[in-house]
Image (cartoon, grey):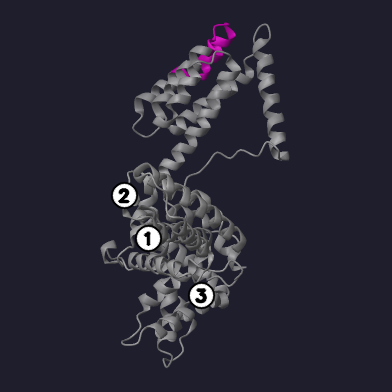
Amino acid sequence: MLENCVSNLSLAHEIVVNRDFSFKPNSPSTNSLEGKVTEIVHRAFWDCLQQQLNSEPPDYSHAMVLLQEIKTLLESLLLPGHVRLRTELSEVLDMELIKQEVSQGALDLNRLAAYVINTMGSLCAPVRDQEIRALHHLQEPVELFRGIFHMLGLMKIDMVNFTVQTLRPHLMQQAVQYERAKFKQILDKDPASLDNTVAWLCTAVSEEMSSVRDGPVSAMSVLNRAYMHLLRWSSLDQKYPETVLMDRVRLDSLGEQVRSLVLDASVLLVTHAQCGGAVWSLPGFVGKLKQSITALLEGSHSSEADLRGALLRVAEKVVQQVNEARCSQENTSLPQEIQEILKGQIEELWRDDNPVRILIGERVQGFLQAMLQGGPPKKSPELASPLRLLSADLAELGRAFGQIVHFNRSVFGPFYAPILRRALIPSEEPKTADDHR
């Protein structure tokens, strides 16, 4: 299956496309069988260590193993420039010397633990400083060991994430060629692996040709139209373009954000039209109103019934906040007739063919298309007043969408080109399978 093959690329793709990507500590759920077994094993290990240390004389066999592991973990966190620290670490955690101290009854675990914690403090990210300080307050040896190993695990993940961030620019350069080569291998094994992509692009070609009355249709405009389709792709349609499968979750999420943003802006627009500029210009009014609208509409897009119910609550809340603002300024509420009109207009926004939603949606689509074309935002259509209030959200959405599209276009451009050629110039001779290579 193509999806299984593509999934092998997902980690590298995620690192490159998602600038917020990071590895997280892998802890099984405490309610799972794995979690319960892990908890039992860990408790047994630490109980055994406690018994050994409490015996007379103390048995340090497990503690010695842990100290060696701590030393190894600390060494793995050192950079080439840490020459002095590496030497110091070898001297303080000299296992032969520690064995002698054990045999002479002179081992001081708290001293060694303090050194380890101080060393970790010099190596860890500033975000870990508070946790490092907390370790200094631990006195009981077993708790110290547990805390140290937990912190070393976090530091190891921090180091990996730092390396990923540092290498991202270099990964970007290599990822295009890597993903393109892997997809070519898939295509060589199964030439039908582009069927959904062909249908996706041909639909965009037909629509672009219908909308352009004069002049030729450009391949870039077709591609941009095709990518815009992905933001409103039906979750029931399984024929998703193969070349964008790894980004489907991201694109579905962005599509949901577009719908939310359009609704938020639509509510703001009809409210502005009815409540008047005096109320609208009150300090903090619009921000508070936007916050209420966004909170009440969150998660309401899954069904028509949910959206209609949410908009009823939004209408009530908007009228309430407008009246409160008017009373604080003019000591009077909105006329009852205007209140009913405003509520009705907000409640009618559940319809896909609502004129206000269509207007705002077109402006959002225009803005995103301008982002795809690489032009500055000032060349995008003039934003309606409510969208200017949401400009930061819109800009972030456009940035995330543009990043996915530009990377995808770089990787799969050689596969898209022959498809677009045949669709835009039907009379052209059929291409061989090499066109996809």
Q: Which mark is residue 197?
A: 3
The amino acid type of the residue labelled 1 equals Ala
Q: Residue at x 57, y 11 (%)?
A: 102
Residue 283 visible in image: yes
Residues packed near mark 3 inside 10 Å, few (<14), some (14 to 19) or many (20 plus): many
Q: Residue at x 59, y 23 (%)?
A: 65
Indicate which label's residue lies in the foreground, 2 or 3. 2
The residues colored magenta run 92-109
Residues packed near mark 1 inside 10 Å, few (<14), some (14 to 19) or many (20 plus): few
Residue that numbered label 1 is attached to = 273
Q: Which mark is residue 281?
A: 2
For the residue pair 316 and 296, the one nearer the viewer reads as: 316
Tell me the SS state at disc 3. helix
For the residue pair 355 and 30, the one nearer the viewer reads as: 355
> Does the stretch in magenta take in 96?
yes
The amino acid type of the residue labelled 2 equals Ser
